[in-house]
Amino acid sequence: MDNDFYADAIRCFVTDGKPVSCVAHGCGHINHTYLVTTDTGRRYILQMLNGGVFHDPEGLMENVVAITRHIAAKCADPRGSLHLNPTADGRLYVRGEQGHIWRLFDYVENSLCLQTPETPEDFYQSAIAFGTFQRQLADFPAETLHETIPDFHNTPVRYRQLRQALAADVCGRAKDVGPEVAFVMAREAEAGRLHGMRMRGELPTRVTHNDTKLNNVMLDADTRKPLCVIDLDTVMPGLAAYDFGDSIRFGAATAAEDEKDLDKMEMDLDAFETYTRGFLEACPDLTDLERQTLPLGAKTMTLECGVRFLTDYLAGDVYFDVHYPEHNLDRARTQFKLVADMEKKWDRMAAIVSRLSET
Ligand code: GN1
Ligand code: MG
């Protein structure tokens, strides 16, 4: 515990034993996450919220507390919902000296967190996890949630932000992204379709996770069945197609989000089918129109994520953590390759959803 930065934060929380180690943990692009071990062997997840991304940490923590309690009340296994540990005076987060917000979760013991599915069954189970999450929150009063990142999946706003970054061109990078910008702009009308349907009330607003990457699911290490869903900072009112779509974007991709060899990047139709099967099983109450929009959710979330990476590249990498200068551009390119591949497979994606909807 040689680092005052997090050692000071841990000391605010009541822990079982004295913290003896704290190491960086996980693969998130936004918050800073550490695994803390105490001298009794208990493990915790210490997390510092990214204040540049989350402007209302109090509201965000109110969301997380309410959601985790709501889910915990429905689970027999204590690992079925994240558990926040309080400070000595009963608060569930602290504001450190530099203004950072810290919180301490129990570590989910005997669990697995995967970056890619090792088997189709893993991906199916992640669909069950996110589908169950949505179902567990179906009776949660969505209107009481704070909007932790306004317009998070408002794709037209994401386009506007891209245009602003292009016009400002603060790093002189606009000249290098002509083909990517052309690709995005050619799809603008379609990218706004889901948002338009939401605004017209054609699709029900649900409590959604909004960041349904495979690595936000914890599986039991023995049974490989889902324990819980993590990374609850973007839980907000949204569309079922957002959660479905973001899972496909990440987990049905045949390459990593930052793969440089675009030939490796495709959308695996078998994986698409596997996930669709799990999601429809876990969320049997989706409306017909919600089911029909699932492929559009996959395409929209992938395009939108690419737009966000591209915008951040143009803006000088101020949002997503990057490990080298072109990291965000490489990420944007994989997303656009994935969109192009979905377009090739579009009819088959729609056919899979419609066949699985009938069974
Ligand atoms: C961010 O931090 P992480 O990896 O869980 C981002 C998601 C993106 C994702 C892309 C709050 O999630 O929206 O889809 O990176 N989270 C936020 O990998 O912006
Ligand atoms: Mg995450």
Image (cartoon, rainbow, N blue to C red):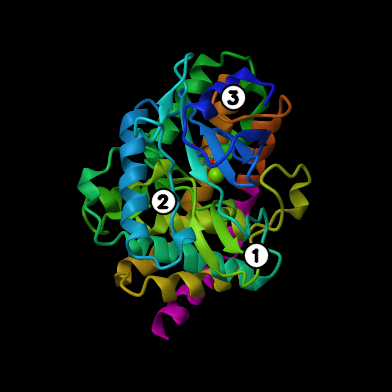
Residue 127 appears in view? yes
SS assignment at label 1: loop
**Residue that label 2 marks:** 209
In this rendering, position of residue 261 left or right of residue 182: right
Q: Which stretch is magenta?
A: 336-359
**Residue that label 1 marks:** 221
Q: Quadrant of the N terminus?
A: top right
Q: Which class describes the residues within 10 Å of circle 3: few (<14), some (14-19), or many (20+)?
A: some
Considering only order in the chain, which callout, 1 or 3, is on the residue closer to the N terminus? 3
Mark 2 vs mark 1: in front: 1
Rendering quarter of residue 6: top right
Tag 3: amino acid: Ala
The residue closer to the viewer here, 261 or 92, is: 92
Does the stretch in magenta take in 302? Answer: no
Mark 3 vs mark 1: in front: 3
The total number of labels drawn is 3
Does the stretch in magenta take in 337? Answer: yes
**Residue that label 3 marks:** 7
Q: Predominant secondary structure in magenta? A: helix
Residue at 63% across / 45% down in the picture?
A: 40
